[in-house]
Amino acid sequence: MKRIINIWAIGLVISVVSSCVDDDKLFELDDFEVGALPNMQRTSNDPGYIDFQDLDQATMELMVDFVIDVPQSDDGGLTNGGDGREHTSTEFAEVSSVQLAVSYNGASSSVIESGVISEVTSWPATFTFKGVQDLIDAIPSLNSKDDIQLGDVFTFVCGVTLADGRELPAFITDASGNSLPNYSVNFAGSGNNPGFEYAISYLVTCPSDLAGNYTSTVLSSNIALSNFRTPQPVTVTGSGGSYILSDGTADIFGPDFPLGLAFSEICGEIFITPGSIEFPTLVIYDLNSATYDPVTDVITFDITYNANSCCGLPGIQYVLQIEPE
């Protein structure tokens, strides 16, 4: 099983690299229009979540710019681009204004809504929001803070208006009427572009602090446990109830191919985001059940790979437990 999956992973990398090469020179990169990618980061004043028990004191503070810090090599000299730069600009075309928009994914809502919440014409810019009234004003279905529930998620994304008049909105609407970020998931994340984030999300939750080093163990599965690495050291990153487990697959793809599992802890209950962090449409987790022990911080996930997953994964079920070190 693991060998088959490893072969798939290698083939995926080869196909992606091959698809980027145009041996016949049918086009040049200069033939394409360029835009701009606003980079969003939380400030140190931002707790990273919205406390359901004290909505009036919720603090959201974001900094937006068109600069990314470029990772340095071990010798402190050349960057991974090889030209010695410490920073690089993502304003590929001149920008005249930036619109900060927010989407609302209600815990009991059927549609994800969005609205523009602020606009600036210079950057870097810092947006500071105290309480939730600005969120309520931006979302059509919210009339007061009484409409906000545990498990709701607010996501900030920036749109831009370019100097030539072109508009790149923060969100687009899919066929079901959901507002989705107008950016590819491949732009962001520590694995692809360290230091770049196109979206910042806030979970409405109770205070939570589960980040740290853990040991994951596969307690049972409907396939041989030899397909997994168990036990395995893992990390949980995040804050305020929104977290990422560094490897939710228990190493089924091998030691060099961990796939993150996004989960949330809301007042003692555990929820997950089905799509894996790196390949959300190819490796999809379905949560059968989960338990959380608030005394020991041990979390147990009962997971089955979704039928739309790739690579022989559909139907594989396993119980994964993570325990703080």
Image (spheres, rainbow, N blue to C red):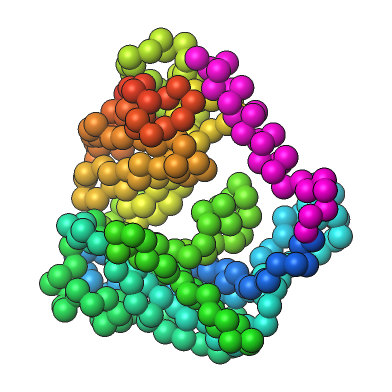
Q: Quadrant of residue 221?
A: top left
Which x, y percent locates residue 133? 26, 81
Say above or below: 191 vs 116. above
Q: Is residue 29 left or right of residue 315?
A: right
Say above or below: 303 vs 203. above
Q: Residue at x 13, y 72 (%)?
A: 146
Which x, y percent locates residue 116? 38, 80
Say above or below: 97 vs 212. below
The quadrant of the image that shows the C terminus is top left
Q: Nearer the viewer, residue 188 or 71?
A: 188
Please say whether residue 224 is one of the residues in the magenta stretch: no
Which x, y percent locates residue 50? 30, 65
Predominant secondary structure, magenta span? helix
Look at the image and tell me whether residue 150 can be seen: no
Q: Nearer the viewer, residue 37 or 250?
A: 37
Q: Read off the magenta span.
A: 1-27
Q: Residue at x 32, y 29 (%)?
A: 303
Q: Residue at x 67, y 75 (%)?
A: 91
Look at the image and tell me whether residue 199 can be seen: yes
Q: Quadrant of residue 207?
A: bottom left
